[in-house]
Image (cartoon, helix red, strand yellow):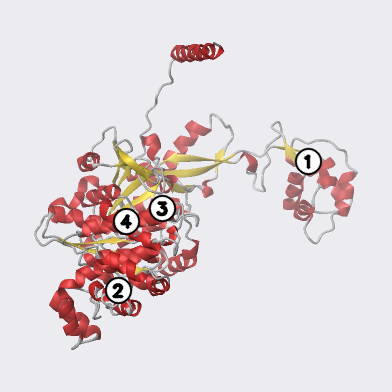
Amino acid sequence: MSILGNFVWSIADQLRGVYRPHQYGGIILPFTILRRLDCLLEPTRDDVRALSERFDGGALDVQVKRKTGLTFYNTSQYDFARLLEDPEGLRANLIDYISHFSGNIDVFERFGFEAEINRLEEKNRLYLIVARFAEVDLHPDTVSNAAMGDLYEHLIYKFAEASNEEAGEHYTPRDAIRLMVDLLFAEENEALLEPGTIRTIYDPTAGTGGMLSVAEERLLERNKQARLRLYGQEINDLSYAICKSDMIGKGQDVGNIRLGDTLADDKFFDKTFDFCMSNPPYGVDWKASEAAVKEERKKDGPNGRFGPGVPPVSDGQMLFLTHLAHKMRPAHEGGGRAGIVLNGSPLFTGVAESGSSEIRRWLLENDLVDAIIALPTDMFFNTSIGTYIWLLDNAKRSERRGKVQLIDASSMWTKMRKGMGSKRKEVDTAAREQIVKLYDAFAETEQSKILRNSDFGYWTITVERPLRLNFSVSRAASLGDKALAKAFGKDTAPAPFLSVLAGMDEQTYLSQDKFIEAVRKEFAAAGLKLTPAQYRHLAVALGEPDASAEVVTDAKGNPEPDVPKRDTENVPFTYGGNTLGDAGRDEAINAYFDAEVVPHVPGAWIDTKKTKVGYEIPFTRLFYTYAPPRPLAEIDKDLEAQTAKIMGLLREVEK
């Protein structure tokens, strides 16, 4: 494919001087699509022209599909060969050609193709470009659908490279897709081999259609009689145009590829699917969709696609995670499976009861997470960070119910001969089979962990320590307006009270009660009066931390918390052998507090009103293996050897 790709890209040599290199893709891509469609339509062109003389509109759509089996057509009298017969009229004829495609072919307007045709004509390049593309045979008999998808992605890569863009923003490497597809299909292997099997698959971030294409290829490799209906939504105009063009060549219903922001406007709001796949952008904010997402969440409530929670606006990955969970075919209809590639943050980001934690909680408590697979670093074109495949399933087989399988596949890769962007590694066939085998086995090994859903839950408890203050009236002169208003009230002039305090003995009290009693007597003698609450506010305002002082209490005699010393602790659901999950809360929390907190912080207590539930998946920690440091003697020996080597080199220099 690189030979064909390089040839097609070499046509851009005709654009030198007229276009800058980063603009080449805007010409090469639409012409490649047009040439592919031209080759696809060639065998049925005469039939369609004849039908167009008798029918139009929807009737023509029906007749063309009935006669040719195609879901698109072109009623123009032109094709590439006839266009070249009239060099003088080429511009007008080419525009006529692209304007006579059926209404579902909207790809050329996404490129602003008519304006580019006019510019090419003005710069005397149009005939040269059309002539070169006419030499390229892109008929499916010559270039298969799979090869055509590779060609599109090769051109996208070259285009992004010339534009200093990230190619990986537009498509996902084939090895990562094949792995995800094989994992998705793993639970339905037998059913997918049945003659006449029909399944649906959906990608809400379809890009150029690579995931959908590979899924279809992998299914047909297993079962030539199977049928996979492909659905996708894409926000980027150019990627959408390429994806739609690729689906046309595969004989898919082009109406199933739709343009739009999936988060703000789900174009398939009324559909669910057998399989779902996605590789959403990492660390990209969803501010443009924020208003629509929050409005939908308010309208649809807890059962909507964003009902479980919303992550920080700085990163929208987890919105796609909950979106896919809602797009799986319901369990009572046979169930669905989803695979999504995410970076590490959705595993643990967010404190208890934050949006991110609540999403994990919803997924785990509803038993939707089937497995999470850690991929090697340097797997994707636009990032070298660690990535993970999340597998979701709403109809798990019995042995997997209530459990999550974690697979560490970070070491299962081969080095690429030539890197592409940040991609230096690939999961080859052997590694892919090894990973799928680990998944199928569903057993505890060094690289596979089986955990209960409740193993990921925890309570965040708030630990308070008693407030201890000493008190002195000498601090009254430095009280601020806020402290004065709290102690004496907004409508009470503080000056008389401060005058009394200024005349008191500057004794330091270690007891709140004794201090208040002393102040009350002085105020009463001066005819001044405060409420019990105001006396406590005044005492706190005149207090300073003192570990030797008595505990400050509230009106009911309960200890007041020392806010700066307030702390939180995460108590695992499983602490002390608890097997009841959140139901065993009090027993597990009390056992943890008695064992882990009380011995170190005497007098501390738990503010039970602030206890929160959280979920996180500590993937790295679960697979961590301790490696003891090297012996000092071994390190010293290496240092001595290096020192001797350096000294030897210095002596050589001196000579």
Please tell me how crowded label 2 is: few (under 14), some (14-19), or many (20+) other residues with Cα within 10 Å.
many
Q: Quadrant of residue 519?
A: top right
Which amino acid does the dot numbered 1 rest on? Phe
Residue drawn at (31%, 40%) of the image: 416
- In the figure, 154 relative to 646: above or below? below
Please tell me how crowded label 1 is: few (under 14), some (14-19), or many (20+) other residues with Cα within 10 Å. many
Camera-side mark, 2 or 1: 2
Which label sits on residue 515? 1
Q: Is residue 46 visible?
A: yes
- SS of the residue under disc 2: loop
* Mark toward the start of the polypeptide (3 vs 1): 3
Q: Amino acid at mark 4?
A: Glu
**Does the CB distance between marks 2 and 3 fall below 8 Å?**
no
Give the residue number, with chain letter if any, for mark 2. Answer: 105
Q: Which image quadrant: the C terminus?
A: top right
Between residues 49 and 430, which one lies in front from this camera angle?
49
Residue 211 location, x and y as percent? 28, 56
Label 4 secondary element:
helix
Question: Which numbered dot is residue 624?
Answer: none
Q: Which residue is mark 3?
A: 161
Q: Which residue in the structure is indicated by mark 4?
A: 153
Location of residue 626 in the rendering, given as x and y in whole percent from the top left corner:
39, 26
**Chain-order first, disc 2 or disc 3:** 2
Q: In 3D space, how far apart are the residues under numbered discs 2 and 1 (Cα atoms)?
A: 84 Å
Q: Is residue 388 left or right of residue 570?
A: left
Instruction: Determine the CA span between mark 4 and mark 1.
Output: 79 Å
Q: Nearer the viewer, residue 504 or 52?
A: 52
The three-letter code of the residue at mark 2 reads: Ile
